[in-house]
Amino acid sequence: MGVTDPAGPVMDRDEVDRALARLGAEHEAIETSLLALQDHAGRRLLEGAELTGTTRERWAAADASITLLWAYFDAYTDALRSAREIRARRRWSSREDLVELTELLRGESVTVAGSATATANAPTLLSAAGRLSERFSLAALVDRMNELYATSLDMVVTADAVWSALPARIDLLAAELQRTRKLAHSVGVRPGEHPAGDDLERITRTLTRLREDVVSDPLTFWVPTQGSSAPGGGRPDTTVYDREAQALEEVRREIDAVLTVRQDAEARLIKLRDVLSRADRTLAEARTARGEVLAKIA
């Protein structure tokens, strides 16, 4: 069997057919994954959001990676199509066809043109990102796409997880805060006049700032799982939210205590007014009786 360089021994027809079947399955799986990433709700949100901080930096890199992913996939598609066309020339491929197929399927036969826009923000881990073009074998190209896909998906899933968890919880807590503020106002607990009123003002400011930060920089509020390599491995950081929720609960209990004291005082006043009313009636009756007695005596 002849040898090609650098692809190695020339593949026979069965090896070519098996390789084409495997590459076709990989192509279908990669296309499905890329389309799912393209339609991911988190990616669409990232595209339209006004990002800041860590999220802005990582999204610039992830967006560039996604652009490169599609360029790599197009090159992979073209190479696979070329290989299928060569194999389809004859039922029994000639040696020349097999040599050409071996070079295409195993050698560094795929050239991907670089894009200034796509590579400007590409991750630094891509050592060849700054080149005008790159050459790959199909296997190396699949590895590169898997690498880019994993990092891009991790970023998208992480941002989406934070956005799905925290803003809605903050809004619910803000609604509870408004109800507590109204209750506080009704019992005379106001900022500058009562410590609980000052606490409500502070919680309001903190929640407003927290929601703005979560919306613009969600990755700041993510705690990755140690040792996990799965995309989005971790959980949203709810430390600030939990602290303010606890503070609001403490204020609410204090206001409930004030309300209880007020209601108890009102109940006592009602009882006192009832006692005084009965006393007034008794005194009036006594005066009437005294008048009647004096009249009889006279």
Image (tube, helix red, strand yellow):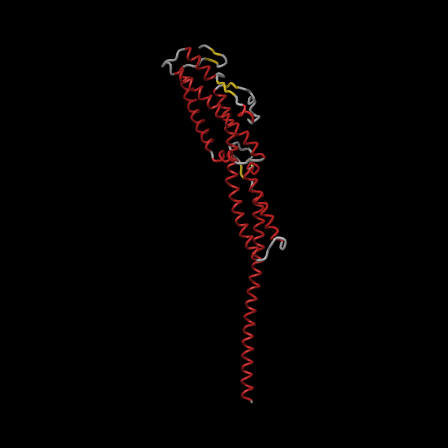
Residue reaching furthest to the bottom:
298
Note whether 176 is above or below 267 in the view shown: above
At a point 45% along the width and 10% down the height, the residue shown is 2
Q: Locate residue 11: give its quadrant.
A: top left
At a point 52% along the width and 49% down the height, the residue shown is 175
Q: Locate residue 89: give its quadrant.
A: top left
Question: Total number of numbered labels?
Answer: 0
Residue reaching furthest to the left:
91
Q: Locate residue 238: give its quadrant.
A: top right
**In which quadrant is the N terminus drawn?**
top left
Horizontally, is 101 left or right of 206 in the view? left
From the top left corner, tell me how far across and down residue 271 is, in percent: 55, 68
From the top left corner, tell me how far across and down residue 257 is, in percent: 57, 57
**In which quadrant is the C terminus drawn?**
bottom right
From the top left corner, tell me how far across and down residue 108 is, in percent: 50, 17
From the top left corner, tell me how far across and down residue 72 is, in percent: 48, 23
